[in-house]
Image (cartoon, rainbow, N blue to C red):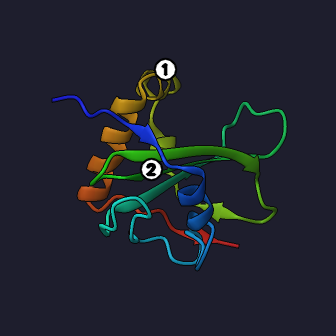
């Protein structure tokens, strides 16, 4: 069965910025859309970006809402990235489909590989 993803509303995205950051508390949290404690996040720093860039994916595995953002990579922020070990072509294939990519990230959460660890 294929999951149909949709975006969070503007107010829901704004609520994601309240409270402790995912860097400080990387575990699951309550989803602003459905209230379930199934909100998850994944961060990556693309090697081919022109400037230091941080890409984030935040999604709810209960109600299938998500948001993805690009921002300046905070100086000194170091984090684990379980996808960094994938060959470039395999990672590109994985990222080609949002549904497949988020399903893969969900599996990593369920297997205990995610959440990531962060250090400043």
Note whether 9 is above or below 11 in the view shown. Answer: above
Per the image, the residue denoted by label 1 is: 89
In the picture provided, is 111 more to the left or to the right than 19? left
Please name whichever residue, 95 or 59, is drawn nearer the observer in this view of the structure: 59
N-terminal of the pair, mark 1 or mark 2, is 2
Which residue position is annotated with label 2?
A: 82
Place of residue 107 in the rendered image (x, y in percent of width and height, measured from the top left): 26, 48
Quadrant, the N terminus: top left
Residue sticking out furthest to the left? 1
Q: Is residue 5 left or right of residue 68?
A: left
- Mark drawn on residue 59: none
Residue in the image at 40% along x and 64% along y: 31
Screen quadrant of the C terminus: bottom right
Residue 91 horizontal/vertical position (percent): 47, 29
Are the two marked residues, 1 and 2, in contact with CB atoms closer than 8 angstroms? no
Label 1 Cα neighbours within 10 Å, binned few <14 / some 14-19 / many ≥20: few
* Closer to the camera in the image, 4 or 46: 4
**Residue at 72% across, 30% down:** 48
Residue 56 in percent (x, y) is at 59, 49
């Amino acid at each position: 069965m294929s999951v149909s993803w949709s975006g969070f509303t503007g107010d829901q995205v704004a609520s994601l910025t309240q409270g402790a950051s995912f860097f400080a508390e990387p575990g699951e949290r309550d989803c602003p859309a459905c209230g379930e404690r199934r909100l998850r996040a994944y961060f990556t720093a693309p090697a081919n970006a022109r400037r230091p860039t941080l890409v984030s994916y935040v999604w709810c595995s209960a109600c299938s809402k998500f948001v993805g953002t690009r921002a300046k990579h905070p100086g000194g922020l170091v984090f684990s990235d379980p996808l960094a070990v994938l060959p470039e072509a395999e990672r590109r294939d994985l990222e080609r489909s949002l549904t497949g990519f988020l399903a893969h990230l969900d599996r990593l959460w369920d297997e205990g590989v995610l959440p990531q660890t962060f250090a400043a």
